[in-house]
Image (cartoon, rainbow, N blue to C red):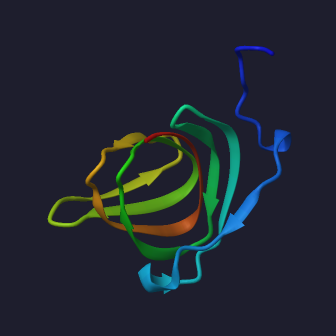
């Protein structure tokens, strides 16, 4: 077993999902996730979503780097940010708000529970 892992979508079977209907505010977003690493409360991979808007609530810590597309992130009672290809950010536990995919978005991520 190697201690090096590339984040390559071709290496795993994608999982297709949608947000729960009660959190969707607009559109019909479809999520595709390529889970590359899952162990010891750490998750890493590639995630993609088609356009739409939905509510989010984070109990975990997440690092994201946008690979393509445009996303508007609005924090309840806080700022609204537009992120696009090349942008990186952290979301900390306790974040609540909305994600609005304007153009199909693809990101790589690392999540720690």
Residue at point 52%, 78% (across, down): 20
Q: Is residue 101 left or right of residue 14?
A: left
The foreground one among 113 and 19 is 113
- When the figure is inspected, residue 113 is found, relative to residue 5, above or below; the finding is below
Q: Is residue 74 left or right of residue 107?
A: left
Q: Quadrant of residue 100?
A: bottom left
Percent coordinates x, y for residue 64 in the rendering: 48, 42
Residue at point 45%, 76% (across, down): 53
Percent coordinates x, y for residue 80 in the rendering: 26, 61
Percent coordinates x, y for residue 85 in the rendering: 53, 46
Query: Which quadrant of the rendered structure holds the N terminus?
Result: top right
Residue at point 54%, 73% (across, down): 19
Q: Quadrant of residue 77?
A: bottom left
| Mark count | 0
Query: Which quadrant of the rendered structure holds the C terminus?
Result: top left
The foreground one among 41 and 31 is 41
Q: Is residue 1 left or right of residue 22?
A: right
Percent coordinates x, y for residue 66 in the rendering: 53, 46
- When the figure is inspected, residue 18 is found, relative to residue 74, above or below; the finding is below
- When the figure is inspected, residue 35 is found, relative to residue 39, above or below; the finding is below
Q: Residue furthest left?
A: 77
The foreground one among 77 and 104 is 77
Q: Quadrant of residue 7?
A: top right
Residue at point 76%, 36% (across, down): 8
């Amino acid at each position: 077993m190697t201690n090096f892992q590339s984040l390559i979508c071709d290496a795993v079977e994608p999982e297709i999902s949608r947000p729960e209907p009660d959190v969707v505010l607009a559109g019909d977003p479809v999520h595709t996730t390529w889970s590359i690493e899952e162990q010891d409360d750490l998750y890493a991979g590639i995630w993609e979503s088609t356009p739409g808007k939905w509510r989010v609530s984070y109990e975990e810590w997440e690092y994201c780097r946008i690979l393509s597309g445009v996303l508007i992130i609005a924090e309840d009672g806080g700022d609204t940010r537009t992120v696009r290809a090349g942008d990186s950010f952290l979301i900390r536990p306790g974040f609540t708000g909305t994600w609005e995919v304007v153009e199909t978005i693809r990101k790589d991520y690392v999540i720690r529970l």
